[in-house]
Image: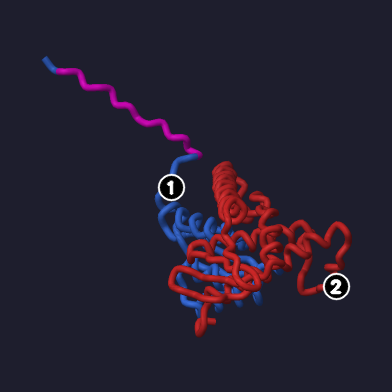
Chain colours: A blue, B red
Amino acid sequence: MPIPADPVVVPQIDPAKQTDSKTDFEPGYLVICWNDPVNLMDYVTHVFQEVFGWQRKRAEKHMLEVHEKGKSVLTRESLERAEFYVHQLQKYNLHATMEPTS
Amino acid sequence: MRLVSRKVDEFVFALTAQEKGLMLTLLRFFPQVPVAHHRLNQTATSPVARENQRLLEDSLTAHKADDKEWVATTFQGRPRFQPVAGGYHLRVKRAEMERLLQIFNDLRVGSWLALSAPDLEEKRKLSPTRLTAPFIQRMELAGIFEMILLKALQGPGNG
């Protein structure tokens, strides 16, 4: 006698919370640091070195770009990594955001 | 405050009694920056973006509460300053240097925000009044402590 199969239960996924693998895992987000008149230039350079593990020369280049052009794109990352970096920069009270590339 | 010695994992600073008093007074005002000051992104307004913003603020709130507890236990709860001739020695571990930097910078940025975020390159706008003078003092003082820590971290030949 055949054993009836268990009913297949399809998980209910809230469309608003559904992850789009293409969006989440591709490097589609820019991590941007914006200029402000309060953070010291040496401090900003130090934070870039700490958060991204950059050499001082590279950190200074981005710091000067922030200072002179108003912002600098620091890296292009997946959603999760971009959130991580923005969070790290904000722990240091830098004005950082993440923006989609398109 | 000046650097006395620097090892791989420990920095020793010499402070006068006045500098020690200023540092402890300043640290009592931490934190100053409201967590809502930070935005995850500039434009997104979707429910998911709002939720991500909330998570960011929760995380920053927890981070600052942890730092506040650390300040209380490290600087105000037990003797951290070793008396020496002419003042005190303060020993700071490498990981604590990062924490102190973040804390002093919170005090600097928070004081600046309390002053309505003036353009600091136009110093004339920073004319002190009875209301603004404490914030100007805190902002400048926090900046001085930051620079001393940064110089110590850079070390000779790395600056």
- x and y percentages locating residue A98 in the rendered image: 55, 58
For residue A95, which quarter of the picture? bottom right
Labelled disc at residue B124: 2
How many numbered dots are placed on residues in this image? 2
Judging by the rendered image, the residue that carries numbered circle 1 is A20
How far apart marks 2 and 1 lie (CA) works out to 51 Å
- Tag nearer the camera, 2 or 1: 2
Is residue A13 or residue B148 the one in the foreground?
B148
Instruction: Name the residue nearer the viewer: B154 or B24.
Output: B24
At x 74%, y 62%, the residue is B138
Query: At 47% across and 59% down in the image, what residue appears?
Result: A28
From this viewpoint, which residue is outermost toward the front? B85
Give the position of the N terminus of chain A as an image quadrant: top left
| Quarter holding residue B120 | bottom right
Question: Crowding near pointer 2: few (<14 within 10 Å), some, many (20+)?
Answer: few
How far across and down, in percent of the image, does residue B84 sit?
60, 70
Residue shown at 74% from the left, 58% from the top: B113
